[in-house]
Amino acid sequence: MSTGGPVNLWTSSEHVEDYLRRADQISHRNEGEAALLEFIPAGTRRILDLGTGDGRLLALVRQRHPETEAVAVDFSPAMLEAARQRFAADARVRVLEHNMDFPLPPLGRFDAVISSFAIHHLVHERKRALYAEIFHLLKAGGGFCNLEHVASPTQRLHEEFLHRIGFSVETEDPSNKLLDMETQLGWLRDIGFVDVDCQWKWRELALLAGVRG
Ligand SMILES: C[S@@+](CC[C@H](N)C(=O)[O-])C[C@H]1O[C@@H](n2cnc3c(N)ncnc32)[C@H](O)[C@@H]1O
């Protein structure tokens, strides 16, 4: 039954299974993930991964920074189960159920907050509020790295992107609430992040990064 709220299909196990089946084939994502790894501050000890899914990005970061402890947040039962399985033998990773439509619970402070392809499922107002919460969760010098699905400037470019990743306007995820990159970079600067930039981009996939100065 519809609650009348914004569409978000990620609590459906079929939606999750479909994504996880093709997650490795998403064009250029490995480049974006590699770029993100470069922006994790040296000496990072605590990491927060928002919309962790099955923990794929966090696992990459933990390989590079095995000494870190991490909190992985998601709200999808199937994703939480997959992440818990992935990190079952890793006592340094805590997998936490939370719906990011609502303010984050108290989690302590972090050296890095990361996210991949998750925040675009929140309505714009909530995206901005979450960015401000992230700022306050970061220690001084901590970094925010959001590998994100952003809006194209034109419908033609949007359709071309969808075609490149095997979708069309008819089949694209109705949970997506895409927003252009410039607006999001502006929000990060307004909130107080420094060194804000788009550090990598391929069509609608972009790495937005900033530091709490
Ligand atoms: C496209 S998947 C990406 C998963 C993972 N970060 C990756 O890169 O493979 C989007 C993720 O965002 C999560 N998500 C979407 N809306 C959410 C919300 N309101 N609260 C928490 N997680 C959410 C989904 O459950 C899903 O795990």
Image (tube, grey):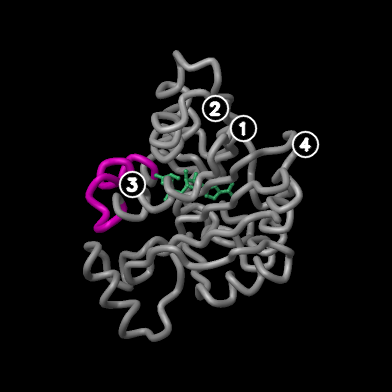
Give the number of the disc on residue 106: 4
Cβ–Cβ under 8 Å for marks 3 and 4: no
Q: Amino acid at mark 4?
A: Pro
The residue beneath circle 2 is: 68
Q: Measuring 37% from the left and 49% from the top, which residue is drawn there?
A: 33
Q: Amino acid at mark 3?
A: Tyr
Q: Measuring 36% from the left and 55% from the top, which residue is drawn there?
A: 32
The residue beneath circle 3 is: 19
Work out how far the residue at label 4 is from the one at label 2, CA to CA, in angstroms.
19 Å
The residue beneath circle 1 is: 46
Give whichever of discs 4 and 2 has the lower sequence position. Answer: 2
Query: In this image, 34 relative to 151: left or right?
Result: left
Q: Measuring 37% from the left and 67% from the top, which residue is drawn there?
A: 201
Q: Nearer the viewer, residue 136 or 163?
A: 136
Q: Residues within 10 Å of mark 2 (few under 14, many from 20)?
A: some
Residue 91 on the magenta segment: no
Give whichever of discs 2 and 3 has the lower sequence position. Answer: 3
Cβ–Cβ under 8 Å for marks 2 and 1: yes
Residue 26 on the magenta segment: yes
Q: Nearer the viewer, residue 11 or 165?
A: 165
